[in-house]
Amino acid sequence: MDTAVRADFKEMTEASQQDWELIAEHARNFWEGLAGRILDHLRLLDGDFGGFPVDRLQHSLQTATLAHQDGRDEEYVVCALLHDIGDTLGSLNHADLAATMLQPFVSEKNYWMLKHHGIFQGYYFFHYLGKDRNARDQYKDHEYFNYTAEFCHKYDQKAFDKDFTPMSLEEFTPMVERVFAQPKNSLYL
Ligand SMILES: [Fe+2]
Ligand SMILES: [Fe+2]
């Protein structure tokens, strides 16, 4: 497709059916590149230690590797890989970014886990910062409480081991591509 072909309106009120068919075709091509753009963004975490024993890319790879080795399904492993991708742009609400990016492609359960993993992970360190480590208990009756607590306990809080060599980003790439190839819900579908 010729990417130089463009619609010719100045205001949306002037657009035609033909314009929107053209734009929709461009959008489908753009969506196909989403997994690649996300992986490029994940690479920004490389070398970003923030005082931790391993950098944020290593932490992401370790989290995903632990989940994979524990037999988790592909969607879960991809959530584990991308759970902290929001650290660069959402430094004060990183969990929301991963959740929002993955929402069209994952179950409601995995979306909830991503969105709330920050407060659940706080169980392991909030008390060192003068905060309540049990802040997650506000969700104690939620159906996904145990599911999210398990993610943090088994994978997220364990993934800071500088002596552990995780699977590579290249090994996870086909998994990311498969998950992002199958949107489940979106306003634009
Ligand atoms: Fe996180
Ligand atoms: Fe994490």
Image (tube, rainbow, N blue to C red):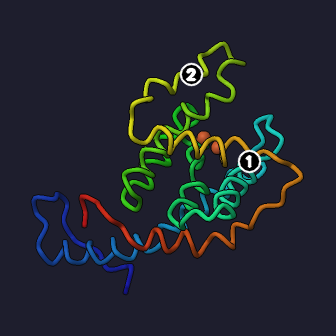
Q: Is label 1's Cβ within 8 Å of ligand 2? A: yes
SS label for mark 1: loop
Up/down of 108 relative to 36, above or below: above
Residue drawn at x 17%, y 57% is 11
Up/down of 152 relative to 102, above or below: above
Q: Is residue 155 left or right of residue 96?
A: right
Pick out the residue farthest to the right. 163
Up/down of 67 relative to 155, above or below: below
Residue drawn at x 57%, y 49% is 83
Indicate the quadrant where residue 16 lies. Answer: bottom left
Q: Is residue 74 left or right of residue 48?
A: left
- Marker disc for residue 96: none
The residue that label 2 is drawn on is: 134
Which quarter of the rendered picture does the N terminus lie within? bottom left
Pick out the residue farthest to the top. 130
Q: Is residue 27 left or right of residue 59?
A: left
146 or 114: nearer the viewer? 146
* CA gap, disc 1 and disc 2: 21 Å
Residue 182: x %, y % from top left? 39, 72
Q: Amino acid at mark 2?
A: Asn
Q: Is residue 94 left or right of residue 167?
A: left
Residue drawn at x 10%, y 58% is 13
